[in-house]
Image (spheres, coloured by chain):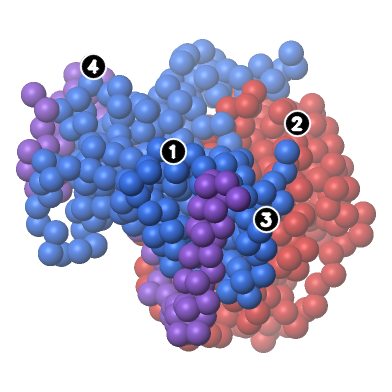
Chain colours: A blue, B purple, C red
Amino acid sequence: MSELSKLYATMMEAIYGETSLAASYIVPGKVLSAAAQLGIYQGSVKGGLVQALGDLFPASKGLLGEQFFDAMASRYVAINPSQSASLDHYGETFPLFMQRFEPLAELPYMPDLASLEWTWHLAFHAASTNAISPDVLTGVPLDQADQLQCILVEPIYLHRSDYPLLELRALGLMTESEVDAVDIASGGGCYVVFRDGLNTQMSQVSPPLYALLEELKKPLSFGTICAQWLSKHPDLELNVYTAELIKRSWIADFRAINN
Amino acid sequence: MSNAKMITKSALASMIAVGVMAASTDAFAGKPGFEKCQGIAKAGMNDCGTSKHSCAGQAAKDGDAEEWVYVPEGTCSKIVNGKVK
Amino acid sequence: MSAFKINPKDYHGVGIGLRSAHYQTILADRPDVPWFEALTDNYMNDGGYPLHYLEKIRAHYPITFHGVGLSLGGVDPIDLTYLKRLKALRSQFQPIHFSDHLCWTSHDGRHSNDLLPMPYTQDAVRHVSERIDQVQNSLGEQILVENVSSYLSYTMSDRTEAEFFAEVAQQADCLILCDINNIYVSAKNHGFDALDYLKAMPKARIRELHLAGYEDQGDYLLDTHGEAVHEPVWGLYERALEEYGEIPTLLEWDTNIPDFSVLMQEQSRALNYWTKKQARV
């Protein structure tokens, strides 16, 4: 290993708090010791990542308060070094960390909310596709419908939760002043995070529509999905839900299925 | 025609019907476009790629190395029935 | 290596660092700013608002590209995916030039997302010069490399930062982005003379200057980009203009971001020094 490699390896370990060996590489200052100089970088790196988590999980931060959130985030940072040059990639496992984080045990809705926030972030920065135009839609051959794949727009993310995530998020962001209390006992639901042009949005949908969306995410033909529906929900009118998908602009295309 | 094939055809027909109706009532064209957006709808969207240094992570800000001393103090105090004992 | 093609009409005076908080103000008011600097790392995603706004702003202003993610001084291989995305952005937005820093940011797959100082040795000169050269070859043009603020120095360093920088610029045949605030911050933290640093820089390679505000932490100065430019930095800026001539200058403000009008006040103060200098020539 080159001298440069050795120095960087030791510095990086020191920055993430795993060793104090780096001090021997550092010239002690007149005012600050080597350890104190290193501490400035530790603080800057940790601070930058904690800040990034706060930006990516703003509703979680709002619900927990800055002091709690930042202290929790700094514990996450200590064991989860950044693995990308982009801070937009940092924090994917933060919801899982929150799930296992003892001081949050009494607030079980927090990991669900955080995982919703992560997909919100992904949707916000994703390339988006447009809904199918009426012209293209009318041109889809009815007789071959069962051979085609019905393609959802992108991005579209699905969340099922036992907690009222729409209300929790609004409360965390305090975007709606009329939200002054959320009753967890009011229950959860099925949520869809999607984009309308540049605007990221979130909707609550009925369980059957949600189930249909889950199937459409799989590489199955439209015929297979419809046949499955028939056996699983013989009492529910499929047409109502497929029509709903068009109304909501969630279908991008009908295409020959790729095997 | 099998039952499954019929239901598939009818499912697509209902989609086309809605699409055509929406087109004739101009519902698609009526969607708010980019220009009308009310701003960047992501709270706290950050400029992450800056060349600044931060003092946010300095030791004084989370001096409790061992004990968990903070209590959530954000808006989650407004959540009822939210605690699991 | 060919120099980038700059239309002097597009690139002069004092530009402002583009931040998302100001996208809409800029588009609505079209302030009299000669160019904006876009932070490339904020536009590496596939879609969404940031790219949309950058496109709109680019339609009215020239832009420069400034990055923090290449880890030019590092030893992990240059991230080719990152470089590829950078090239795609460059062909989409046609920036005046691209710059990154004389520092390292990652090692062995771990990232600091921070600008970490290099040791100033012969080995390090050779190492970082080769990497800058690699990037320049890949982009097909010279890049600007910027000095960082630092809070520590290494026992293995055997030359000053300015000497190191000059050697790197020579060997890599790159251009220089000279951050006046960073020189001041490092000079205070390490106890060297900022003017000596200015004078030791290879003048002919300097293409742009940066200005920003530090934060006084008592025992040291921290480069937070969260305040107005401090008086001694303005003084040093004036000396830099005397030393180097009228170099296009960029104002950065990244934390506690104020109203755009505050940036315009700072911009016009910088522009005053700039035009004063121009008038004397």
- At 92% from the left and 54% from the top, the residue drawn is C1
Q: Pointer 2: what residue? A: C77
Q: Nearer the viewer, residue C246 or C62?
A: C62
Q: Chain for mark 1?
A: A
Give how far apart the Cα atoms at labels 3 and 4 are. 65 Å
Q: Which residue is mark 3?
A: A144
Coordinates of residue C5 in the picture (x, y in percent): 85, 70
From the image, state whether disc 3 or disc 4 is nearer to you: 3
Q: Please state which of the two labelled residues, at mark 1 or mark 2, is closer to the viewer.
A: 1
What kind of residue is marked 4?
Glu
Q: Is residue A167 rendered to the left or right of residue A120?
A: left
Q: Which residue is tagged 1?
A: A231
- Does the image show residue A38? no
- Residue A257, label in figure: none
Residue at 79% from the left image edge and 26% from the top image edge: C123
Which one is in front, A29 or B81? Answer: B81
Give the answer, above or below, for where A163 lies relative to B70: below
**Number of residues whose C-alpha sits closer than 10 Å to that of mark 3, classed few (under 14), some (14–19) or many (20 or more):** some
Q: Is residue C167 left or right of residue A25?
A: right
The residue wearing badge 4 is B66
Chain where mark 4 sits: B
Q: Secondary structure at mark 2?
A: loop
**What's the amino acid at mark 2?**
Pro
Image quarter in which the C terminus of chain C is found: bottom right
